[in-house]
Amino acid sequence: MDIIYRPTKAIIDLEAIDHNMKVLKERVGAARVMAVVKADAYGHGIVQIAKQALKSGAEMLAVATPDEALYLRDHAVDAEILILGASPVSFLGEAVKRNITVTAYSLEWMEAAAAGLEGTDAPLKIHLKFDTGMRRIGFEPEEAEAAFAVAANPVFEVAGMFTHFATADEAANPLFLEQAERIKAIRQKWNGGPLLFHVSNSAAAILNPELAFDAVRIGISLYGIAPSSYVKNEMHLELKQAMGLETEIIHVKKVKKGDKVSYGATYTSDEDEWIATLPIGYADGLLRGLQGQEVLVGGQRMPIIGRICMDQCMIRLPEKIAVGEKVQLLGTQLNDTISIEEWAEKLGTIPYEIPCILTARVPRLYRGA
Ligand SMILES: *Cc1c(COP(=O)(O)O)cnc(C)c1O
């Protein structure tokens, strides 16, 4: 559906993506940067972000699913793509044809893949994924030799090896160092051809650049969001939030002292008050838990009052303000900024969830770079 007549929109600042890519590349030195654009580039728009990240210096892309990789190929993105999650064997012929690299994560999967690939002309590019402590997908460290033996089948081309940290974004967790030691020991055992060895997500790439090895997988920080408040405090890096969210006031009214506002009548005005209605609600991703969150109007903070509805919500104004006035829900207006971290804190969640919950009804518009 085209979205033309509603003032609610997300503005994605490609200049911020460019800036973040450059400072992150500087942090990891010679390591290649794999821009992680899964989940529609964390809600920012997969094609636009992939193209900008490559233009700004990313050497590769990573996605979570086969369909995300195919979507990129169908939109003229021909950079190297790694699928981080599990791919069904039924997809592998297509992966070979479209030059998409997949993750090999269990002996069972590898055997099924080898059988499925019998008779195809080109080898399937794989990265061997080891589970060194996350307990999600990946070979057990003890399975290394067996995995290497199956990987020697000429239907495969082993292009990389990796693991994923469970605790890279927190202070000195012993599991982090254990995982690093386990994967280094597995790397030592490999006696096949050259491969891309990578272990780090944003948090590890930023705080432990000595573990950058051949490549890093950069997701959240590319979008200008710190992986955690711990990383934010320790990183000494200026990231720029790429996502802004804005709308306009569509109705202004004066309510009497004691009037109730919105479903459930949870808000009662203390005095005669000016309130405004905004055309954005939980169906856009403005979750009901954001009741009380502030928005910016003319650079000033004003609270969301009463229950957030599916398509609309109300804010309290300090005085009468004209219909049509711009409202910033995320991002900067004059001298103040509402960060994604602020919403995450209000909702009791991690910042990763915030851009991902803005729904398809909110158009993404791009500016800069
Ligand atoms: C999502 C993901 C990343 C990116 O993590 P960020 O914390 O967003 O940088 C890296 N590696 C794997 C395996 C992932 O699933």
Image (cartoon, rainbow, N blue to C red):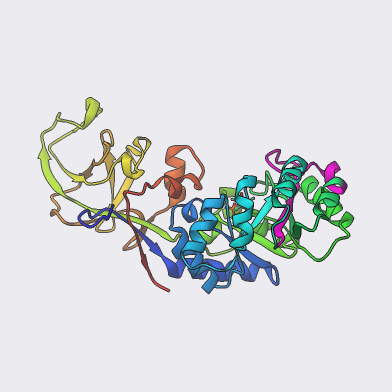
Q: Is residue 128 magenta?
A: yes
How far across and down, in percent of the image, does residue 162 sit? 73, 54
State which region is magenta.
Answer: 122-145
Depth check, front residue: 205 or 183: 183
Depth check, front residue: 155 or 221: 155
Q: Can residue 49 be seen in this view?
A: yes
How far across and down, in percent of the image, does residue 19 sit? 51, 70
Q: Tell me if 226 is positioned left or right of 266 in this view.
A: right
How far across and down, in percent of the image, does residue 80 sit? 61, 65
Q: Is residue 341 magenta?
A: no
Depth check, front residue: 340 or 99: 99
Depth check, front residue: 303 or 54: 54
Q: Tell me if 153 is positioned left or right of 270 in this view.
A: right
Residue 232, above or below 55: above
Q: Tell me if 163 is positioned left or right of 346 in this view.
A: right
Q: Tell me if 167 is positioned left or right of 240 in this view.
A: right
Residue 142, above or below 16: above
Q: Which residue is drawn at 25% across and 41% down?
A: 311
Residue 70, above or below 133: below
How far across and down, in percent of the image, does residue 188 sit? 88, 57
| Residue most extreme to the top | 264
Q: Residue at x 86, y 57 (%)?
A: 190
Q: Can residue 224 be seen in this view?
A: no
| Residue most extreme to the front | 119
Of the 4 image quadrants, the one containing the C terminus is: bottom left
